[in-house]
Image (cartoon, grey):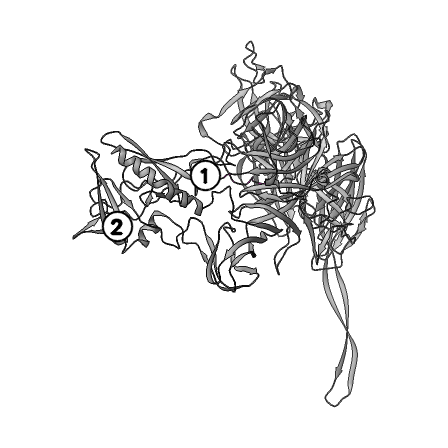
């Protein structure tokens, strides 16, 4: 056996005596001293979709620091209070002075089912209570069958089945068998030549987290500027809370294959008895109920809560939808990704959603544009035109910062209160890129294509745009599939390889373009 | 009553002690010296050397604590002076239902409890049938068990031999002589598997990375292997099985190994397989994920690169992020210096505070030493490509001249040969593509821009003009290496002439 590549020097010192033969100490570390959580988006979630709070598809990198006293000799260090969604393959453990031998994650949890299963062959007590007198009798028994729907006990009288008699009877165990813990636990086997206190760092990826940016855009009454505000919305499905955690979120598109941790083993006992049909009533009323439907692990539906951190609403100006924030996430580059750091430790609570201000950009130059991509030969009735909010991600426009993907709500002022003008989403936008957000179809701005004349050589069409807005609006039409046979009456520009007509439609007015299509 | 109870408890103790001796508790195992060889494709070879007391002649030996998923047809048993008569794998599990069904025709004890007084009455009964309900004969009466709904305990005298708590292997052996001797049991089992997991800490400014390799082995076979000597085999056993590939996302470029290596690693080998023995015996518990380190390399050269793959006639309405790839070598010189078993490479990079952050992962197959790897870790936030089909038109209908030669051997032996020309009309298309490459990073970057689809049944695709020089990598694919200045934009215009 070639061992020289293995990093543990300690192995060379000790003989290959089996682990079980050595005296082992078990050291449990119940919680981290310091913890950092970096949340990553669900890679398969589209930017326009909200995270499903009941089943978050993103993940987090959790880094913990723990102070651990390692005894001399071989010992097992149990890291308790780690995230339930810990992916053991991803774990990195550093700080053991003499390295580690191996790390283990056991999926067996303490539950009625595993308790029974692991007690096979052990001595337990069967307790029976008399309905008539209330007298309790305990009798020694040995479990002879596993938990898969059957309990057969051996008592001094012979062999009996549990809960098939109609009597109230139950099992009493003397102790919890080894290897059953309340929560999924990562343990590390290590060996030390002397007792030592070490600061150990444990980093791992945990499933069941997600985050996104949520943009709130207030349109200025002049229609040419917006106030941009964004929340960083973090969500956790995990059963473990991380108090006072250094919290970050990473924006960008990362290759990640969801690796589900090994399913946890542990559940209720479902007892089945012998056939119990009777003369009168079938089915038997004393049959145990079916096991409850399996719930998504780590999620309990009713303790969802939303925490808003470090914000206070401006009471004097209720027209503004953008809150005033005192705690803002700080952005930095991380390789090809963008990292957003919450500058002070916050609590990432179990089954909760948290929001911290991501960015505030007042007075950004932007414009509402009505835009269509049209087939020029498709004459059709008047239709509404989709509205776009367009700007460019530059300092000249008042932006010039990376914009991570997320949902966006556009508010306009009017009647003394903010009014939602549309909901949409934004994909990742780098500095310098065009920012174009599509909203729904506007009702008051329509377009229509009519076939007005036709000869053997050509067909002539007219595109008409109408607006009921009290101010002029900008309309853009791109013509798809328009080759050399497309002959507009006036010179058009080009965008993305398609002819482009840009027109300013006057207030409460109309504009039109005539073109021919040659046969 | 109390005295009776005490008496029965007293009496039961020796009986129970005897029972307990029969079944070892789960923490004790009947396994002997176990050696486990684990393959990548959910397969393991277990060798279990147990000390057995075998009498002379025929005897039945039970082997508890074999894998619950044992492939019993692969079991072999060897021992000095031991011949095998037959092997049985019993999976008739003990349950109240099985117990009752096997008790048909047998006599059991009923204990009836009076609900008003709590008084118990014992009766012996014969089980007549257990179909849907239990029919009993008590003396001269025929009754259905618990037909009146009153509590009745049924006590069985014994458990039939072949009803077991767990699936059990038993072998009937013929031995020449009695005595204790080592017997080796060998079998294959699914449920055990392993893969490699790599942790790569990449330092972009230094162009270096540290790599740790971990063997991750999982046991879902239903049985723990106590104190096992474990060897992991990199490679897939069996004929036409698909090799491990991982489930890379669609953005991954084709071919993560740019050049397959030809060097031999220092690892132990067996035929095509590399062996990774664990350094010491270990207990692989059921439902356990266990990790052991096998590779630790510091400061190996690594570089970040960008790739963009565009399919034929693909245009996007907006700029699309380029793929970020990490390039490194597994060669002895300037590389990891090892063969890499299949697994997942997770890449970390330090943030401004110096804490490692996850920046992406990629699956690799079994990679020989000396390979050049190019792993896609994600999409670049700041480096984007916007491909646009500017114009596509049919330009000419050319006369295409084809020539064919023929030679005919006639029945009388003479040969006729000649040449024949034919003219065909073909359509030629010109496609003008514009690729706008943008870089919002404060440093210049180079993007490998691939356009594929050039060989689309028609092979004669030409590039008529291009604003940057290209490399025609294959008949189907062309590559431009485009360097974009810091915070800059580069536009690449290309005209293709195709027959499709």
Residue occupying image coordinates x 75% and y 35%: B202
Do the dots labelled 2 and 1 sit on one chain? Answer: no
Residue A12: x and y in percent read 73, 41
What secondary structure is found at the residue carrying circle 2?
A: strand
Chain containing mark 2: B
User: Are the residues at dot 2 and dot 1 in contact (C-beta closer than 8 Å)?
Assistant: no
Give the class, few, some or many, for how many residues have Cα within 10 Å of label 1's Cα (few <14, many ≥20). many
The residue pinned by badge 2 equals B134
Chain containing mark 1: A
- The answer to if A260 sits in the magenta stretch is yes
Residue B87: x and y in percent read 48, 61
Q: Is residue A405 above or below residue B474?
A: above
Left or right: residue A490 versus residue B54 is right
| Residue A76 lies in quadrant | top right
Distance of mark 2 from mark 1, alpha carbons?
30 Å
Left or right: residue A390 versus residue B105 is right
- The answer to if B482 sits in the magenta stretch is no
Give the class, few, some or many, for how many residues have Cα within 10 Å of label 2's Cα (few <14, many ≥20). many
Which residue of the protein is positioned furthest toward the bottom in this rendering? Answer: B412
Residue occupying image coordinates x 57% and y 12%: A314
Which residue of the protein is positioned furthest toward the front in this rendering? Answer: B178
Residue A264 in sight from this viewpoint: yes
Q: Is residue B500 above or below residue A418?
A: below
Residue A518: x and y in percent read 65, 49
- Give, as a single range, the part of the protein colored magenta: A258-264
The residue pinned by badge 1 equals A114
Which residue of the protein is positioned furthest toward the top in this rendering? Answer: A316
């Amino acid at each position: 056996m070639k061992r020289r590549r293995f990093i543990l020097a300690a192995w060379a010192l000790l003989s290959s005596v089996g682990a079980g033969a050595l005296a082992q100490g078990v050291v449990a570390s119940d919680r981290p001293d310091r913890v950092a959580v970096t949340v990553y988006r669900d890679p398969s979630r589209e930017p326009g979709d909200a995270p499903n709070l009941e089943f978050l598809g993103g993940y987090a990198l959790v880094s913990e620091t723990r102070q651990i006293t390692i005894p001399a000799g071989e010992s097992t260090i149990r890291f308790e209070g780690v995230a339930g969604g810990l992916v053991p393959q991803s774990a990195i453990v550093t700080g053991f002075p003499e390295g580690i031998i191996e790390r283990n994650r056991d999926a067996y949890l303490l539950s009625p089912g595993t308790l029974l299963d692991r007690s096979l062959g052990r001595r337990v007590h069967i307790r029976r209570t008399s309905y008539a007198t209330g007298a309790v009798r305990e009798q020694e028994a040995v479990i002879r069958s596993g938990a898969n729907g059957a309990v057969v006990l051996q008592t001094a009288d012979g062999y009996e089945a549990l809960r098939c008699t109609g009597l109230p009877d139950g099992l009493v165990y003397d102790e919890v068998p080894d290897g059953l813990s309340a929560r999924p636990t990562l343990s590390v086997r290590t060996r030390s030549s002397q007792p030592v206190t070490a600061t150990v760092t444990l980093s791992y990826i945990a499933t069941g987290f997600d985050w996104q940016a949520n943009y709130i855009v207030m349109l200025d009454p002049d229609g040419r500027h917006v106030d941009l505000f964004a929340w960083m919305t973090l969500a956790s499905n995990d059963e473990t809370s991380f108090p006072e955690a250094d919290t970050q979120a990473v924006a960008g598109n990362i290759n990640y294959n969801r690796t589900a941790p090994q399913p946890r083993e542990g559940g209720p006992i479902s007892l089945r008895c012998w056939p119990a049909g009777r003369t009168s009533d079938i089915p038997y009323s004393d049959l145990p109920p079916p096991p409850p439907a399996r719930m998504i692990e780590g999620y309990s539906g009713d303790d969802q809560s939303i925490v808003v951190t470090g914000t206070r609403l401006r009471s004097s100006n209720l027209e503004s939808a953008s809150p005033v924030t005192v705690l803002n996430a700080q952005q930095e580059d991380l390789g090809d990704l963008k990292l957003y750091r919450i500058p002070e430790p916050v609590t990432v609570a179990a089954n909760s959603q948290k929001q911290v201000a991501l960015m505030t950009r007042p007075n950004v130059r932007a414009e509402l544009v009505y835009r269509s991509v049209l087939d020029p030969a498709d004459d059709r009735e008047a239709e509404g035109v989709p509205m776009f909010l367009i700007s460019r991600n530059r300092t000249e426009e008042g932006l010039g910062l990376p914009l991570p993907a997320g949902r966006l709500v556009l508010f306009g002022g009017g009647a003394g209160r903010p009014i939602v003008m549309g909901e949409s989403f934004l994909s990742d936008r780098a500095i310098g890129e065009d920012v174009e957000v599509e909203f729904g179809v506007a009702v008051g701005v329509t377009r229509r294509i009519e076939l007005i004349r036709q000869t053997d050589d050509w067909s002539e069409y007219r595109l008409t745009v109408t607006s009921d807005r009290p101010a002029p609006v900008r309309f853009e039409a791109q013509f798809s599939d328009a080759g050399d046979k497309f002959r507009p009456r006036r010179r058009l520009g080009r965008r993305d390889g398609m002819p482009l007509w840009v027109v300013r439609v006057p207030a409460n007015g109309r504009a039109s373009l005539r073109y021919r299509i040659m046969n | 009553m109390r005295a009776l109870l005490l008496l029965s408890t007293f009496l039961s103790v020796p009986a129970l002690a005897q029972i307990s001796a029969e079944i070892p508790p789960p923490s004790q195992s009947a396994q002997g010296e176990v050696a486990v060889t684990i393959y990548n494709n959910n397969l393991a070879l277990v060798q279990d050397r147990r000390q057995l007391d075998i009498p002379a002649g025929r005897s039945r030996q039970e082997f508890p604590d074999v894998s619950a998923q044992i492939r019993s047809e692969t079991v072999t048993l060897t021992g000095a002076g031991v011949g095998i008569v037959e092997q049985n794998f019993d999976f008739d599990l003990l349950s109240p239902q099985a117990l009752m069904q096997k008790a048909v025709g047998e006599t059991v004890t009923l204990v009836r409890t009076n609900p008003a007084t709590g008084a118990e009455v014992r009766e012996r009964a014969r089980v007549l049938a257990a179909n849907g309900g239990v029919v009993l004969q008590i003396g001269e009466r025929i009754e259905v068990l618990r037909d009146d709904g009153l509590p009745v305990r049924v006590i069985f005298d014994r458990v039939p031999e072949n009803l077991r708590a767990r699936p059990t292997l038993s072998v009937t052996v013929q031995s020449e002589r009695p005595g204790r001797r080592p017997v080796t049991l060998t079998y294959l089992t699914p449920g055990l598997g392993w893969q490699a997991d790599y942790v790569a800490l990449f330092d972009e400014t230094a162009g270096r990375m540290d790599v740790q390799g971990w063997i991750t082995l999982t046991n879902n076979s239903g049985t723990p292997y106590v104190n096992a000597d474990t060897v992991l085999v990199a490679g897939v056993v069996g004929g036409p099985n698909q090799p491990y590939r991982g489930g890379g996302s669609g953005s991954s470029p084709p071919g993560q190994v740019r050049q397959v290596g030809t060097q031999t690693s220092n690892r132990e080998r067996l035929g095509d397989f590399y062996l990774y023995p664990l350094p010491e015996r270990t207990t692989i518990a059921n439902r356990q994920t266990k990790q052991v380190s096998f590779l630790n390399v510091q400061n190996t050269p690594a570089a970040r690169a960008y790739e963009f793959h565009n399919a034929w006639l693909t245009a996007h309405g907006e700029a699309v992020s380029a793929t970020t790839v990490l390039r490194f070598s597994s060669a002895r010189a300037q590389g990891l210096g090892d063969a890499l078993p299949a697994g997942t490479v997770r890449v970390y990079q330090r943030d401004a505070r110096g804490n490692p952050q996850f920046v992406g992962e990629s699956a690799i197959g079994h990679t020989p030493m000396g390979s050049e790897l190019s792993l896609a870790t994600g999409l670049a936030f700041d480096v984007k490509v916007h491909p646009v089909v500017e114009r596509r038109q049919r330009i000419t209908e050319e006369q295409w001249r084809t020539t064919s030669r023929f030679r005919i051997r006639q029945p009388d032996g003479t040969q006729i040969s000649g040449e024949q020309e034919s003219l065909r009309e073909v359509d030629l298309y010109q496609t003008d593509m514009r690729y706008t490459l943008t870089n919002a990073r404060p440093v210049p970057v180079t993007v490998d821009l691939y356009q594929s689809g050039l060989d689309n049944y028609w092979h004669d695709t030409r590039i008529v003009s291009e604003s940057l020089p290209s490399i025609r990598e294959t008949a189907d694919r062309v590559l431009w290496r485009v360097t974009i200045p810091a915070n800059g934009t580069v536009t690449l215009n290309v005209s293709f002439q195709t027959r499709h």
